[in-house]
Amino acid sequence: MSMTAEFRTHVVKSPQQGGCSEAEVLACLQRIVASEGFAGSAQLVRFLQYVVGSCLRNEAGLLKESSIGVAVFNRGGGYDPKTDPIVRVEARRLRVRLTAYYETVGLGESLRISLPKGGYSPAFERVVEVPPAQAVRSWRGRRFGAVVAGLVAIAAVGGAYYRATATERLVALFWQALLAGEKPVVMVAADSGLVMYQDVTHRAVSLSEYVSGEYRAGAAMASRRYTSIADLEFAARLSGRPEAAKLGVQPRYARDVRMEDLQGGSVILLGARHSNPWVELFEKDATLRLAHDEVSRIFRVVNTTPKRGEAAEITVSPEELKQGIYGIITYHRNREGPGKVLVVAGTSVAGTEAAANLLLDPAKLRPWLEKASKDGTIRGFDMLVRDRNLAGSAPHAEVVVFHVEGSR
């Protein structure tokens, strides 16, 4: 006997239709923006709040790309969506984050907020169980059929819940190894002032020169303390993870770090050698590295142990950076002390952001952690991601190389 249960959603086009109240929408919105996937992204939060608020005020017809660019992304009155795709890029990011929310912590939500493709007016969906077209019949008749349908429904929901919790457990195991040690994890942000100095002088600064600070003599540009907004956003989002609740994340500017700071526990470094010379200390175990030529301004992605079909080296010129970017993630034990080392770097700020976004998206990270996990632990790994460069953002990064310690 075949027994099936069918679940469908009833789409409510506005809060006033279908019994969906404004209070329900606002409560759901609050849970979404307070979740891990949104807590560290103020720009996406503003975007979602703006479009939902406009819909609640019956102003969905005014949600145009041009008006959103001015109201949400602070573009001026002369903003031209044809030359600046910020709204389209962030809309794609918002759709991805909403999907991830409802696949994990928002799995039990009875109301779903989405941003359908092709426009910027949000949709509100209430999940409604619809009975199967033909009731299951047996010797006990309809009552037994109703019980069976209910059990199938529970099993379906339970299966989805198990998948969500399995994702959370594996991702939590990864972050716990980094964030839940005996000391706060030290997160070293990139030095954008150093990047500007090297770009102007066409001379690379070694780690020993960087530590001594002699290269800054007479160079005002090199003395300025800059870092990228992508690094700050990563630190904020990482601090919101539950594994960091006890000891927290200790952000450090690269220029303020000393050797002893990196020997007490886990370390997270943002940027390649070009922007964070401390990375040099932790490349011994990594199979993927980023190298930058200060004269030609060409980035090289170096693969020290290429597998079949993988290139030993990928070169990215300044012109090519306008079209595509690369980011790397390397995760290994800390040879300078207890704990782990995580390096997140890119051929541009967008490349670093692409790698960071993958790390902080449980649904995208889990398949790769499964490949790296063995005997209840997660082995060291190296990952290369690639994406298009759209107005300085990388909305849909794909993994093109993945290496695991101890595998052939």
Image (tube, rainbow, N blue to C red):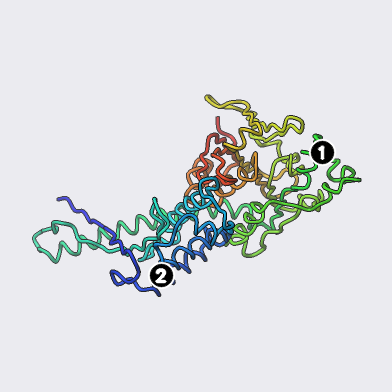
Residue 404 position (above or below residue 107): above
CA–CA distance between discs 1 and 2?
A: 55 Å
Judge the density around disc 1: few (<14), some (14-19), many (≥20) Cα neighbours within 10 Å: many
Q: How many marks?
A: 2
SS at mark 1 in the image:
loop
Image quarter of residue 287 = top right
Q: Assess whether mark 2 and mark 1 are in contact (beta carbons under 8 angstroms).
A: no
**What residue is shown with label 1?**
205
| x and y percentages locating residue 27 in the rendered image | 44, 72
Residue 408: x %, y % from top left: 55, 29
State the SS at label 2: helix
| Residue with the mark numbered 2 | 56
Tell me where residue 43 appears, x and y as whole percent.
Answer: 56, 59
24 left or right of 400? left
Q: Amino acid at mark 1?
A: Val
> Upstream in the sequence, badge 1 or badge 2?
2
Residue at position x 69%, y 47% in the image: 269
Where in the figure is residue 315, as x and y percent of width and height? 64, 29
The amino acid beneath tag 2 is Leu
